Image (spheres, coloured by chain):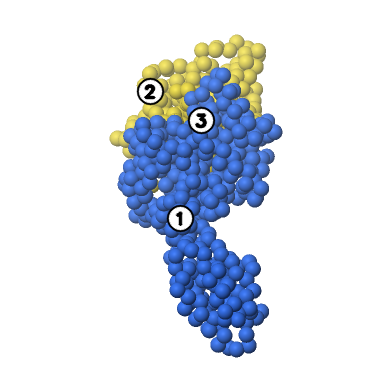
Amino acid sequence: MSDVMIEAQGLTKRYDGIAAIENVSMQVRRGEVLGFLGPNGAGKSTTMKILTCFTSPTEGTAKVNGCDITTDSLGVRRSLGYLPESTALYTDMLVLEYLEFAAEMRGLAGGDVRKRLKAVVEETGLGDVIAKQIRALSKGYKQRVGLAQALIHEPPILILDEPMSGLDPNQAVEIRDLIKNIGRERTVILSTHNLAEVQVACNRVLIISKGRIVADDTPDGLRDRAGKSRCVVTVQKHQDESFAKLVEATWKSLPSVERARLIEDEDGELTYEIIPRGNEDVRPVLFKTAVDKGYTLLGLSREGQNLEQVFRELTTGPVAANSGSTKAAA
Amino acid sequence: MQRTLTIAKREFRGYFNSPSAYIVICLFLLMMGFFFWNPFFLVNRASVRSMYDLMAILLLPTAPALTMGLLAEEKRTGTIEILLTMPVRDPEVIIGKYLASLGLLCVLLLCTLAYPLSVSTRGHLDWGPVFAGYFALLLQGGAMLALGVLASSWTDNQLIAFFTSGIICFAFWVISRFLPFIPQGIASIVEWLSFDYHFQDIVRGVLDSRHVIYFLTVIGFSLALAFRSLESRRWS
């Protein structure tokens, strides 16, 4: 078996003729933590349900750990642990009972059950709640139980559908770190619509929009590809009405600047967004120009376009003017 | 096989993790006590013959109550997603759940053994017919539970599952009462399809294999349909 743990080809799923995903192909290699990113309803869960053999594709095939999802669904399911979006657990059971049930269903027996139970309880930090009823647990702990059942049989592949949604920021960070740890030894696919999570937890990102894959890259690569770092420069406004236009024209006239536009005009401050032609840092040029022209420089900063903007561009088309919430810090 | 038993064990325990099993058993026994002892002393005979008909009727709402949640509730809460992405075949899931409900039926029937036992202290009781009666109840109850599992596989609403299986079971039971109104030609077929025709024969001690096969067929057919219904999620 090669290093390719998951290979999907041309997966299409139609519900009543309407495609939830269309022609989705991907490869996930051993040891990758793949972030599956997309707006709600883009087809993330559908893809995951197909890969976990909960549902079948209308067209296309996929192999998970070398097993075909249609002809060897049991083999596929043996190789993976799955945490569905709902994290629905049997709430009337104790945590311990539930994990024992999961272990038995996974074919563990006798001493192995105890050994693995101990290991996952430690790994997911469930020690304190092991004798509690699942219904009494907080959302964060329920999520841990969900992860624990997915890990109990030491699967080489983990598929986690929105593992961090609905958690408070502290819980989300805890779960994220947990997943990061888990991902050291395993292949993980996790879906999310939260970009910060992807940036921290994943080493590859797949963006899906309207059922199609629109980008496949590393978080850094994605940023580089779609986002040249931009500068935000703020100068003091003059009484002169045409001043704003004049300054904009000045920026545009610089050879190293590709685009420049006024993005904010208030409190006597003019803020411009400057997109450089290459990837070079244009701040020195901007500073010198401002000094030469006698502008009073109030702020000058450079920022890489963050994933959020990339995401929006890829999933909704170009970012609308002034939509960025990235006001320059002086 | 191992997984079938694991599922059965979990479901069976699940009955007792919530008050549902206790409520169903208590209600069943209360109703039975009420309807059994009233006429018993009027007849004044050490017989529990009337008990089986009574229990067959009481099972009409009881069996659907035991099975309504088995699949419907899993679908509603979403727990079915983890269950069906474990390495388990769909039929194993269906059979496991069915076995759990069958287990609870056995508990229920064991509780009612108090009746023949107490009757036997009042006079001589012939245990042969008693076992025949319980055998008939187990078969008919088993068929009703299988129909209940089927109804539960059709919906994600427990109440709908309850009424659907209740109506189907009632139809199978009541149909023999309508025989006089049914044209001769098909009357025998309808009679053969009804629960009661087979049930009464077994209770009377006629242990014909055809009766056993009838109930086993209903059970097998229902569970097979439930399996198809569960499987259909893949293609919808």
- In the picture, which chain is blue? A
Q: Secondary structure at mark 2?
A: helix
The mark closer to the camera, 2 or 3, is 3
* Badge 3: residue crowd in 10 Å (few <14, some 14–19, many ≥20): some
Residue A291 x %, y %: 59, 77
Frontmost residue, A163 versus A305:
A305
Residue A274 x %, y %: 51, 71
Q: Kindly report the distance in space between the C-alpha atoms of the residues bearing marks 3 and 1.
A: 32 Å
Q: Kindly report the distance in space between the C-alpha atoms of the residues bearing marks 2 and 3.
A: 45 Å
Three-letter amino acid code at the position of disc 1: Leu
Frontmost residue, A115 versus A270:
A270
Residue A48 x %, y %: 44, 44
Task: Report the disc number at residue A154.
Answer: 3
Three-letter amino acid code at the position of disc 2: Ile
Above or below: residue A226 compared with residue A110 = below
Task: Report the disc number at residue A5.
Answer: none
User: Can the viewer see residue A320 in this picture?
Assistant: no
**Residue identified by numbered label 2:** B213
Are the two marked residues, 1 and 2, in contact with CB atoms closer than 8 angstroms? no
| First in residue order: circle 3 vs circle 1 | 3
The mark closer to the camera, 1 or 2, is 1
Q: Kindly report the distance in space between the C-alpha atoms of the residues bearing marks 1 and 2.
A: 66 Å
Above or below: residue A139 compared with residue B209 = below
Which quadrant of the structure image shows residue A130? top right
Name the outermost residue toward the right: A128
Q: Secondary structure at mark 1?
A: helix
